[in-house]
Amino acid sequence: MKAICTILLCLLCTSSVFSQYYLRGEIKDEINTPLPNAKILLHSSKYLFYSGNSGGFGILSANPTDSVTISLDGYQEVRVKLVNAKYEYITLKPSQAAGNLRKTRLISVTKDMRWEERHNWSVGGETYSNLLENEFIPAKKFPETGFAISTDKASYSNIRRFINMNSSVPPDAVRIEEMLNYFNFGYTSPKKDSTFHFDSYLAPCPWNAESQLLFLKVCAAKVNLDTIPPSNLVFLIDISGSMDMPNRLPLLKSGFKLMVNNLRDKDTVSIVVYGSTVGVWLQPTSGAEKEKILKSIEDLTPGGATAGASGIKAAYQVAKSQFITGGNNRVILATDGDFNVGQTTEDELERIISLHRQSGIYLTCLGVGMGNYKDSKLEVLAKKGNGNFAYLDDEKEAEKVLVKELTQTLYTVADDAYLSIRFNPALVKDYRLIGFDNKLNAVADSLSELEGGEVGSGHTLMAMFEVTPTFSNTSTDHSFASRESLANININYRSPKDSLKLHSLFTVPFVFTEFNDLPACHRFAAAVVEFASLLKKSKFSKEISWNDVIILTNDAINPNDYMQKEFLGLVEKAKKIYGRQKKR
């Protein structure tokens, strides 16, 4: 009996030590809109939690009362005391000057590297506009670097416009990663229940005999077209006076009509316009009523000033009013980007978008026009709006983005995605990430942080590093190197509408392939990089000629691929344009 009492007493003591309490509540903004994905730091354990889609949360704590710090981009940070069994209603206030809003976002970053150590990259005025080209980095000192994965392709079609107009290309308009994103480099479906497939090649660098090229190819899973949830789409269309040109509003109208013809009955379309008026042009309408939607698009006429900020606010209000839980909620902004009424600067527009990015509504930006086309504004909006960005220079491009690649454009399989790579210093002396160049002010800002991208269904990303090999890498005695991996890959991401951080881990094997033995699509990717480097007037292109690009393209081109054949024509046109400039 004594023994039983002793056991019961121990159990009671143990249960009190390990008892857990449930702290609950929900987080909303000042107009009672739920705020999902708010960060909740539990002070007693230092664990990090996130609010759900409805703004609610439930946290287990060892204490009957505990305190938390709640933070969310675009809102003031708050500290709250939570009590067991008491349901807390927490309101976050927008912060126009909050540090989170003013943080500059990077698309690539090297771990542990300080600004002072890269400041010399811009000495002598060798950077163009506000883009800072990535330099070689010592792998022994900084083995880990990373970059955002996204589906943006705007740079290539914008460059094509300049060249087809018989004009040189502004160097800062050249974003190499977007040019590579434009092409099809082959697709391999990920394994069942996996989001990404990964493969790599290591080969000689065609423009530098002392270097090697590391190709990284990432393929995202495809959504099942039979189970795609309904879409809540808001077309936000600029009808201001600046859109009154054939390659602006008429081009957008053609593109949207093609898109509407491919929508399903369960999809919903609304149209918000800004220009001579700002407001809802078409109330939410089922995809079954295609004639009604098409007529509304056809009736659009340009005129007035460009109150883009007001239009953005109105479009998000409509999207929120029709929000589909578990569905595809997206605003599609179509404009030349020439905002001239209300909030017009990139910082002001960025703050507006930041207040909405946590709502589960994505933003796709479609740019058109020339002369006053504001590429930088649309790029900022797309990145801040957790979305993607394309430039439409003709009807074929509109069809490509809004019809042929509709699932990539509209349906997301991964959010906040970025790839981290850790090089093996025994095999890599130095490395240079090709493309993914940051803005100069972002690199200089000590508060800057890497911002992941949105990855669309079935997207294939090709990324490349130029690496300087070590002696062990190039030695004829590969007994050591053959036992080593060249690098390790970690793809970080979230599933759409989920706050949980996920990881996909891969190994880059140390396997060397002669350049001519590479798949043709990889050799073509190297030609795209050479072409882009010449257009950027990169200091790494000094050994590259236009003939080199043409020869490499001819050797790798797929004669059945229209886009690759078009690329060869652009290179030949560019050779003539830039050749004339040298003669002058």
Image (cartoon, rainbow, N blue to C red):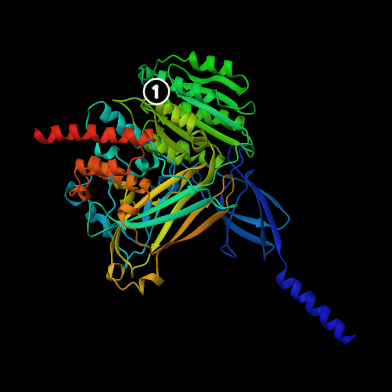
Give the residue at x 30% y 26%. 372
Which of the image's four quarters has the C terminus? top left
Q: Quadrant of residue 164?
A: top left
Camera sees residue 342: no
Q: Secondary structure at mark 1?
A: loop
Give the residue at x 26% y 59%. 211
Residue 64 lies, in percent from the top left, at: 69, 62
Q: In the image, 516: left or right of 578? A: right
Give the residue at x 32% y 42%. 175
Viewer-nearest residue: 32 or 526:
526
Which of the image's four quarters has the N terminus? bottom right
Q: In the image, 298: left or right of 83? A: left
What residue sits right under mark 1 in the picture?
306
Camera sees residue 559: yes
Amino acid type assigned to the residue bearing label 1 in the image: Thr
Vertical placement of 456 versus 87: above or below?
above
Vertical placement of 390 versus 463: above or below?
above
Q: Quadrant of residue 35?
A: top right
Viewer-nearest residue: 437 or 263:
263
